[in-house]
Amino acid sequence: MSLINAAKAKLAAQGIHSVLTQFCDIHGVARGKLVPIAQLADLVSIGAGFSGPSIWGTGLPRFGPRSEYYGRVLLDSLRPLPFMPGVAHAVCDGFAGGVPLETCSRQVLKRQVDLLVKRGWKLWVGIEPEFFLLGKTADGVWRVKDDQDRLSKPSYDLKSIHRTQGLLDEMRVALLDLGFEIQQIDHEDANGQYEINYRFDDALQAADRYILFKLAVHAVAEKHDMVFSCMPKPLANAPGSGLHFHLSITDESGNPVFSSTTDSLGLSDAGYSFAAGLLHHADALSALCAPTVNSYKRLAVSNSLSGTTWSPVWKAMGDNNRTCLVRTVAGRLEWRLPDPSCNVYAAIAATLAAGMHGIDCHMERPQACSSDLYEQYASGATMPERLPRDLWDALQGLKADSELRERVGSLFCDEFLTIKTAEWDAYSQQVTPWELDRYASAY
């Protein structure tokens, strides 16, 4: 029996009648369609067909042989969805005209991973999702769904966890059914904000798993009349949500490339050079890791109602220092720039490309920061260079960084810049309630 027939038989025995063929658009939003399981062979060899121009960021024309986007199913990704009875989820790679599509973000990450494999190395990524549980009032105003979640410092609040236990437990069961190894769930430092930690994986699997995580939690939250929100900062006076990447690389023998037992921070020369590459390309990486207007409300020097903010504003590296952009932890690097609005494939790909540029060029090791950068800022002391202040500045950083654009993929970056520039232009034309309150009668 062929692998495809074996997969069909196994799924049919589980009551599966359809495959949810899922890919991501350039924003990192899951897209796809339902296809009967009988067509699995074609889904693997040819792919599920979609109108290319109907998908954000493909850059495909409206006619011709490359106007169709084909999502080719990865056979080993098939798994039943506990929240969609009779349906199996499948990860897809993007193709057009019979070849890998350069503007497909999963293909962008695959190219970076393949370059690493040629060195005999593997990137491991642990992703820490933070998110809000929101709802709308009768008059359409967004709010924290749990209206009793009002503590001024709500970190690890057990009463909120108790009130939200139904959703959290259903989420836990769904994720376990999907193969997640859950490590912990907690209430974070903003009202209505939670974090879940699960086991790290190789780069591609980690990105695939995060998209599956979002699909599952969106579905569970809707059942509980809540909105699972990946908006980086929905509450003006509270901390925002990050999507921190814990990064490590191993060689062909499984030995850690970043780790050293003789260094005070536990880092090897390669680890320092990788961190230097991240800091060197931080402006351009901001566009891909923090890709919305709202992202820069999180990446701001501000206080929160809780009195605590972990926002990485300055380009610095420090040992277990959460005020730095790069935090070193036990021989690995925590990259604190990304937020949950990013396209996780593109963000990991760009992060890997930047770090490897640092290694290729033997970039000088960054000086370790041993101070609280927020206290240093408040004292008026000289500060490290800060990240872009808004999406426009970040886009200009990506536009100016030809080295990173070339390493990530020029076609993908060009599409990204076009779409995100239009997003910034649309935002810039809005007149907000803050402006009306401040200016309407002031002059």
Image (cartoon, rainbow, N blue to C red):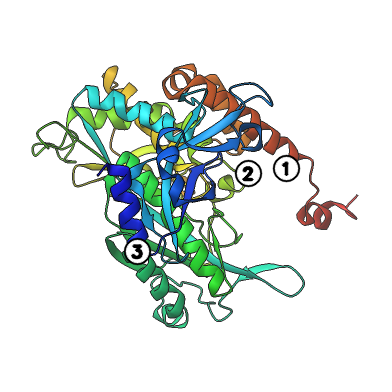
Neighbour class for label 2 at 10 Å: few (<14), some, many (≥20)?
A: some
Q: CA distance from mark 1 to mark 3?
A: 47 Å
Which amino acid type is shown beneath numbered disc 1?
Tyr
Q: Nearer the viewer, residue 246 or 178?
A: 178
For badge 2, the amino acid type reads Val
Q: CA distance from mark 1 to mark 2?
A: 8 Å
Q: Is residue 375 visible from the viewing direction of this image?
A: no
Q: Which mark is residue 324?
A: none
Disc 1 vs disc 2: Cβ atoms closer than 8 Å? yes
Is residue 29 toward the left or the right of residue 165 in the image?
Answer: right
**Residue annotated with mark 2:** 293
Q: Residue at x 42, y 53 (%)?
A: 89
Q: CB of mark 2 within 8 Å of CB of mark 3?
A: no
Which class describes the residues within 10 Å of circle 1: few (<14), some (14-19), or many (20+)? Answer: few
Residue 427 disc label: 1
Judge the density around disc 3: few (<14), some (14-19), many (≥20) Cα neighbours within 10 Å. some
Q: Nearer the viewer, residue 262 or 380?
A: 262
Q: Position of residue 114 (x, y in %)?
A: 30, 26
> Disc 1 or disc 3, which is closer to the eye?
3
Quadrant containing the N terminus is top left
Residue 351 appears in the rendering: yes
SS assignment at label 3: loop
Query: Element under label 2?
Result: loop
Q: Quadrant of residue 389?
A: top right
Where does label 3 land, which residue?
A: 14
Say which amino acid is labelled 3. Gln
Residue for point 56% across, 69% down: 222
x 49%, y 26%: residue: 101
Q: Earlier in the sequence, mark 1 or mark 3?
A: 3
